[in-house]
Image (tube, rainbow, N blue to C red):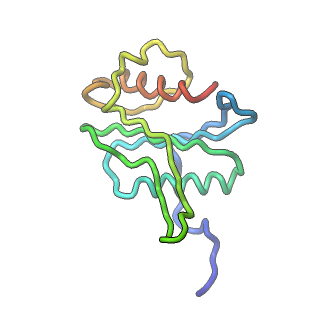
Amino acid sequence: MPTRRVTVGDKHKVDILVETGLKGEPGLILVHVEAQAYEQKRFNERMFIYFSRLYEKYRRKVLPVAVFSYNRIRNEPDSLEMGFSFLEFLNFRFYKLELKKLNWREYIHTDATVIIKSGSQNNCRTMEQAFLCAKGLIHQVLVF
């Protein structure tokens, strides 16, 4: 079997990549935010590929965040596991925000500088309300 570099292949651009500090942690980290407005099979695999490529390039801790803005409530997976019967060798997880499940009013007074451009229709009825939901949840984790 011929050898080839692991990262050779399609080029992909992440939606948002931010270098920042994390509450209670020394040093800087990368925050990768991926907005997902449509259903995609194996989205969790895509998040893992982005994570591994970002880590390979920058050699920093990466906080992967997926913001789902579907028109209906779904239960999206937030992990990717791989293994054999005798060994689990991968247990990747990412932070998941499902805007359809959030009430925008809970986040109206949060003080954060990150806003995710995503829309949702029920609990977050307008684009502005969706911004507030995503911004508030991310602010609970990050320091800017």
Residue ID at (67%, 39%): 29
Rendering quarter of residue 67? top left
Instruction: Tell me residue 15's x, y (percent).
Output: 50, 43
The N terminus, quarter of image: bottom right
Q: Judge from the rendering whether residue 116 lies leftward or rightward of residue 69; answer left or right.
A: right
Q: Report the quarter where the C terminus lies.
A: top right
Q: Which of the 4 image quarters holds residue 119?
A: top left
Q: Residue at x 48, y 59 (%)?
A: 81
Picture coordinates of residue 58 (x, y %)? 70, 50
In the rendered image, residue 80, in percent from the top left (x then y), is placed at 47, 56
Q: Residue furthest top?
A: 109
Q: Percent from the top left, x then y, of residue 18?
A: 61, 37
As drawn, the residue found furthest toward the right would be 27
Count of numbered labels shown in the rendering: 0
Residue displayed at 37% across by 26% down: 130
Hey, which residue is sitting farthest bottom in the picture? 1
Residue under the image location 54 percent in, 40 percent down: 16
Task: Please identify the quarter of the rendering in which residue 117 is found.
Answer: top left
Q: Residue furthest front?
A: 86
Q: Nearer the viewer, residue 36 or 25?
A: 25
Q: Is residue 14 above or below residue 127?
A: below
Is 49 drawn above or below residue 23 in the view shown? below
